[in-house]
Each structure stands twice: as C-alpha cells, then as structure tokens.
Image (spheres, rainbow, N blue to C red):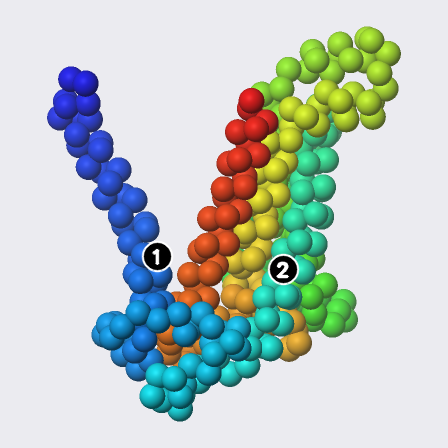
Amino acid sequence: MKRLLRPGWLLLTLYSLLFFLFIYLPLGVIVFYSFNSNPIEMTSWEHFTFDWYLGIFGMADVGPSLGTSAIYVESTDQLLAALRNSLIVASCTTVIATTVGTATAIAMTRYQFRLRNAYQGLMMMPMMMPDIVLGIGLLIFFVSLGFHLSLLTIIIGHCTFLTSYVFIIVQARMAAIDPALEEASADLGANEWVTFKKVLLPQLMPGVVGGALLAFIISMDDLVITYFIAGTDSTTLPMFIFSMVRRGVKPEINAIATLLILASLIIAAIGLYLRSRRVE
C-alpha cells in the first residue's frame, strides 16, 4: 500500500490516466454525439435519439421525424453493399495472410537456408512501407498487367502487407516454443504432419489467432491502399465513410463509427477470451 503512495507510482498512475484519456476521449465524443438529435449542428445537443442508427439501416425516415427534409445517407443499399464488400475482403485476406504468414514464420524459425536474413527483411518491408507508396505501386502493377480493379485486387493488395503482420506475431510465438518437443514427437514415431498437428499447432494457436484478428481488423479499417486499387463497383466501408466525410461530418457518420468501435471491441474481447482459455 505504501508503495502505491510513492511519488513515482502516483506520477506513473497520473500519466497512464492522461494517456488513456487522450486516446479514448475522441472516441467517447463520437459515441456521445451519435445520439444527438440535432441534424444540423452536431455539437449542439438537443435530445437523445436512436434515429441515426435506425436511419442508416433504412428502419426510420430520419429527415421528416426531426423536422428536416435532409437525409444524409443517400442509400442504405450502398452502405450495406460497402459493408458486405469489406467483410468479403477482410475474411478472404485473413485466411490467406494467416496461412502464408504462419507457414513462413515456421519455415524461417525451424530451417536454415541461404539469404535467410535477407528474406526475413523482405517480409517486414511491406509493413514498414508508407501506405501511399504501397498503394501507388500496387496500382501501377495491376494496371501494367491489365488487371480489372475489383475486390480481387483489394484482397491481393491487403495480403501483400497483412502477411507481414501475421508473420511477425507468429514468429515471436515460435521463438518461445521449445524445439525439443518436436524432436521428442519424432523420436516417438510421429511423422511431420502429426507433430505439427498435435504438438506445434496447439502451442502456436494463440499467435495464429492473434495474427488473424489483427489482419481482419486492419483489413476492415484500411483506406489509403484500398483507395488506389479499388474499382468503381468495389467500394468498401472506409471508402464509403470517407466519401460522406468529404461532404461534412453528419450525424450518421457518428453512428456508423460507433458501430465500428463496438465491432472492434467485440473482436478484441473474443481474442482475449480465446487466449485466456488457451492459457488455462
């Protein structure tokens, strides 16, 4: 108890509170104003309402109900189509990036070969490269090869850098696994597939799940790279929100952002739950 009252601990506690306040206060403001009924002046509070949430899904005609003819979400179908595209891209990207990143991490950790360090550096490059540079490079690459910009090009583009994230996370997990366990499995007569399935994969699973969740969230959230390699008929949710913001911050944007925050919290909670079960 006395330790917690020391000046150093008090200063660290104050710094931590200010740090989290700086990060989460803007998100709290978005959530707060997503329930504001004022359709014109977002920061001027009138009264509590769920109409913006109902309106973005076409369940309420928010214009007349609030005394104005303005309806800021032009088409609920466009919003749902953008959400569907984002889910398709994120799901496909997660499966591909997790598979390739996990396999590469295992190979880089367990096997020695020429140019291993150079190959590892190349795996990290897409993650450290500025998004706008990678986006322009992918656009030139697809156009040069005659690709039609679509959901497929977005998936390929996301895989180029999200594989690196999965690779880093799984490789860190691999470094903590004792190779002697795999050697013992082989000595007992298990082949490589059985050893991978029964010995290595269960220990590796927290890293694989963590990498997959991170890849999914980043893919759902990506705007810069997607902006360059998306076709006219492959708008994702971040692109849809960006097109709305360019015409002004409207109440529906706060509602959509709040739903995205809630979805991120749910995904993070699932990841923590799975990790706690794995630890037990």
- Count the marks: 2
Q: Amino acid at mark 1?
A: Leu
The 10 Å Cα crowd at callout 1, few under 14, some 14 to 19, many 20 or more, is some
Identity of the residue furthest to the bottom in this view: 69
The reply, left or right, for residue 27 in relation to residue 241 is: left
Q: Which mark is residue 27?
A: 1
Residue occupying image coordinates x 66% and y 54%: 91
Is 198 on the left or on the right of 273, as rendered? right
Snapshot quadrant of residue 11:
top left
- Quadrant of the frame with the C terminus: top right
- The disc label shown at residue 87, or none: 2
Residue 4 sits in which quadrant?
top left
Q: Secondary structure at mark 1?
A: helix
Res. 109 visible in picture: no
Position in image of residue 244 (x %, y %): 45, 76
Q: Nearer the viewer, residue 175 or 146?
A: 175
Tell me the quarter of the image containing the N terminus. top left
